[in-house]
Amino acid sequence: MSVEKKGPSSWDVLFAGFWRENPVFVMLLGACPTLAVTNNVINCFAMGISVLFVLVMSGILISLLRNFIPKQVRIASFIVVIATFVTIVDYVIPTISLDLYDSLGAFIQLIVVNCIILGRAEACASRNGVGRAILDAIGMGVGFTIALLCLGVVREVLGNGTLLMNTPYEISLFGANFEPWSIMILPPGGFFVLGMELLVINWFRKRKEARALATAKA
Amino acid sequence: MSVSETTTPTSPPQDTVSNWSMLRTLGAISFVSGILLSLVYQVTFDKIAANNEERIRNTVLELVPGSVTQKEFTFPSLSNPELMHTVYAAYDESGVFQGVALEAVDLGGYGGEIRLLYGYLPDEQQVTGTKVLLCKETPGLGDKIKTDEAFRKNFEPLQVPLNDMREGLLYPLKMVKPGAGGGPGQIEAISGATISSQSVVNAMKQSTEALLPLVQAHLQELKEQGK
């Protein structure tokens, strides 16, 4: 997981988070907000962008300060830096929309303890230059957003029959006779959808590995 | 990720030096983040307050028919002067008093707190309707308190005359089974969402009993303030 200084190219660092090392689907980090806020698409966007912002900003700062922070207090320092940016997000979101802020609830504040961010600070930002830290943060943040959207789209379409509900761009998909699967909007729906998606992704990966092994043998 | 593996064991001989540098680092980071946060707080404070106000204003104007402006009043409770109640008075464009919107809160919903605003016309002694501000009820079941037509009709309008003492309701609000209502002060529950309905009724009962006599007592003041 740790990115060596001379290892992968910048593009690899950026794209690793999108898919190959996707924080949710591959590393299974940050599952708490993933399950909790993905019941509609707009929440996923807001959560994803917030995490992206916190990741990038704390990545930059931690990478800049990495030579000044004594080893013993690095976790405490990282948490203070992360908490600062999370609080900024917490102030900014209600200026955009109070309804959005209400529906995200405590999960914005809980980004502080999201292990994706502390994990990237520890594994990447504190050991690499600013450029690489930014690329890694963007990659992980976008990967997290993609994963949230993968869940959010399924849950909202099945659970409410709409896309982008609570926004001016709401699209109703199935007409008036559609009976929403309420379970999809409720917390169990998050587990079901995440489980299904992990199943599909791992099935593909296993198959790919098996093929690679077969071609290597032949 | 593996925090414990990479943590180097602290070496006692250098403690005095590293203690100072640890303190310095943490202090500096906290100091800078404190400054940053207070800046962001000041920048966003007005906008957040304005958003909150706009949300309440829109709801108040929606609840009181014919109103275009609203004003906020706080009055001490009749039974307990320490306790302050907020009353949102609504006026039309020439400043004529139309009615008030009042807040009702109950903590006994299925998902916790339920908060709503309701419109009240003091002259007609009736509730014009309710609007749920905060609801954490189960989607598809409890959150029908926001959408269920029959349930909303209970409050559109609901006659809430005061009793002769002018300190409570003549017919205290009471929840009844769906289809069994119709009497004065009776609210028909949503079938399948009894707890959420009960919570709304409790909120309304408590709020109407405390606030309606208060509004009636200050009615003259509310009417004059619009001019």
Image (spheres, coloured by chain):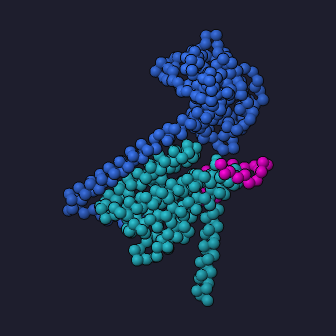
Chain colours: A cyan, B blue
* Residue A139 versus residue B121 in the image, above or below: below
Image label count: 0
Residue farthest front in this picture: B94
Name the residue: 43% across, 58% down. A57
Which stretch is magenta? Answer: A168-194
Front residue of this view, candidates B111 and A110: A110
Q: Is residue A107 magenta?
A: no
Residue B19, x across and y down, in percent:
24, 56
Q: Residue at x 71, y 32 (%)?
A: B152
Residue B114 lies, with reference to residue A94, above or below; the image says above
Instruction: Give the position of the C terminus of chain B as an image quadrant.
Output: top right
Observer-nearest of A109 and A12: A12
Name, please, the residue furthest toward the bottom: A218
Q: Position of residue B135 (x, y in %)?
A: 61, 39
Q: Position of residue B119 (x, y in %)?
A: 64, 27
Left or right? Give the position of A129 relative to A146: left
Residue in view at x 74 percent, y 54 percent? A173
Relative to B46, does residue A136 appear above or below in the rendering? below
Note whether residue B92 is visible: yes
Farthest residue, direction top: B164
Please tell me whether residue A182 belongs to the stretch shown in magenta.
yes
Q: Is residue B38 left or right of residue A22?
A: left
Quadrant for the N terminus of chain B in the image: bottom left
The residue at 49%/69% (across/down) is A14
Asked which quadrant contains residue A7, the reply is bottom left
Q: Position of residue A177 (x, y in %)?
A: 79, 49
**Can residue B102 be spotted in the picture?**
no
